[in-house]
């Protein structure tokens, strides 16, 4: 198989162990890895772009691998956009984001910087994948990294439909035999805000929350990981509701 070129980013930052594991897995299967990632953790920043301040880019050396890498003082979407438009000499075959520390299941993808990094690749017409561990304290990032690299190799050859991102969630300690193609579920939280009082008597709120047990559904990502399987969800960012579009088109709307 010919060498494939992968752009790797994340939202946990350039020094995150999940990113290092993903780079290593891509190199292990003969891929050419390029890295452009935030200089610090930028979790839950979604698809934010830096508009009112300059972006500072720094070449870095990642330990243990020989690859071109940059850190950027911006968002995950900044990193992918900058790499594609300015830093890389050629377009990559695949954009690969992760490995994220913690799950990106159901509606959590709307907030995820990891998924946003992959989405930026898809918006540029490049097949893209976001990879996350289901555990917030994974014992080993290697299984998730191996899944991501293997899927990237497959996608580099077969491609994806235009605008599609593969959102991948890997349970901790999984052995790579059971992979389910799933739909996006709904993830809800309880006790989202914790009310506190600072030493000066001022009230403030800390966003925290605990995930509620997901409602079972037909082929949902939340069901798959609960059963111990790897979840692979094809998602896209055309959010138009076609059924509602047909209904509204019959309205007699006059201003």
Image (spheres, rainbow, N blue to C red):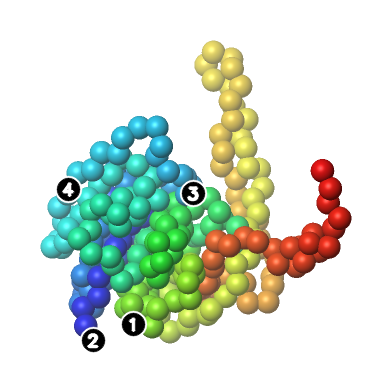
Q: Which badge, 4 or 3, comes first in the chain's sequence? A: 3
* Residue on which disc 2 sits: 1
Q: Quadrant of the N terminus?
A: bottom left
Tags 2 and 1 in contact by the CB under 8 Å rule?
Answer: yes
Residue at 22% in and 50% down: 70
Image location (x, y in percent) of residue 149: 32, 73
Please, what secondary structure does the residue beneath circle 4 have?
strand
Instruction: Give the numbered dot on residue 157.
Output: 1
Q: Which badge, 4 or 1, comes first in the chain's sequence? A: 4
Tags 4 and 1 in contact by the CB under 8 Å rule?
Answer: no
Q: Which badge, 2 or 1, comes first in the chain's sequence? A: 2
Q: Nearer the viewer, residue 107 or 17?
A: 107
Q: Which badge, 2 or 3, comes first in the chain's sequence? A: 2
Tags 4 and 2 in contact by the CB under 8 Å rule?
Answer: no
C-alpha separation, residue under disc 3 versus residue under disc 1? 29 Å
Q: Residues within 10 Å of mark 2 (few under 14, many from 20)?
A: few
Residue at 69% in and 72% down: 217
Image location (x, y in percent) of residue 20: 26, 60
C-alpha separation, residue under disc 4 versus residue under disc 1? 30 Å
Please, what secondary structure does the residue beneath circle 3 have?
loop
* Residue on which disc 4 sits: 59
* Residue on which disc 3 sits: 46
Residue at far bottom of view: 1
C-alpha separation, residue under disc 2 versus residue under disc 3? 35 Å
Foreground tag (3 vs 1): 1
Give the answer, above or below, for where 153 lies relative to 203: below
């Amino acid at each position: 198989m010919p060498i494939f070129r992968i752009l790797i980013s994340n939202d946990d930052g350039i020094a995150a162990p999940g990113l290092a594991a993903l780079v290593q897995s891509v190199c292990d299967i003969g891929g050419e890895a390029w890295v452009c990632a935030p200089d610090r953790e930028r979790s839950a920043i979604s698809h934010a772009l830096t508009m009112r301040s300059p972006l500072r880019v720094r070449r870095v050396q990642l330990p243990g691998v020989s690859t071109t890498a940059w850190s950027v003082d911006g968002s995950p979407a900044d990193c992918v956009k900058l790499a594609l438009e300015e830093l890389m000499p050629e377009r990559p075959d695949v954009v690969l984001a992760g490995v994220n520390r913690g799950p990106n299941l159901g509606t959590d993808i709307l907030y995820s910087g990891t998924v946003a990094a992959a989405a930026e690749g898809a918006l540029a017409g490049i097949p893209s994948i976001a990879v996350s561990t289901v555990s917030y304290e994974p014992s080993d990032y290697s299984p998730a990294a191996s899944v991501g690299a293997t899927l990237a190799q497959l996608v580099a050859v077969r491609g994806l439909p235009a605008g599609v991102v593969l959102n991948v969630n890997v349970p901790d300690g999984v052995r790579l035999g059971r992979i389910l193609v799933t739909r996006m579920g709904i993830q809800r939280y309880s006790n989202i805000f914790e009310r506190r009082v600072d030493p000066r008597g001022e009230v403030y709120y800390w966003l925290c929350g605990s995930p509620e047990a997901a409602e079972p559904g037909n082929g949902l990502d939340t069901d798959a990981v609960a059963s111990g399987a790897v979840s692979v969800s094809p998602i896209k960012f055309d959010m138009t509701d076609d059924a509602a579009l047909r209904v509204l088109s019959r309205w007699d709307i006059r201003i």
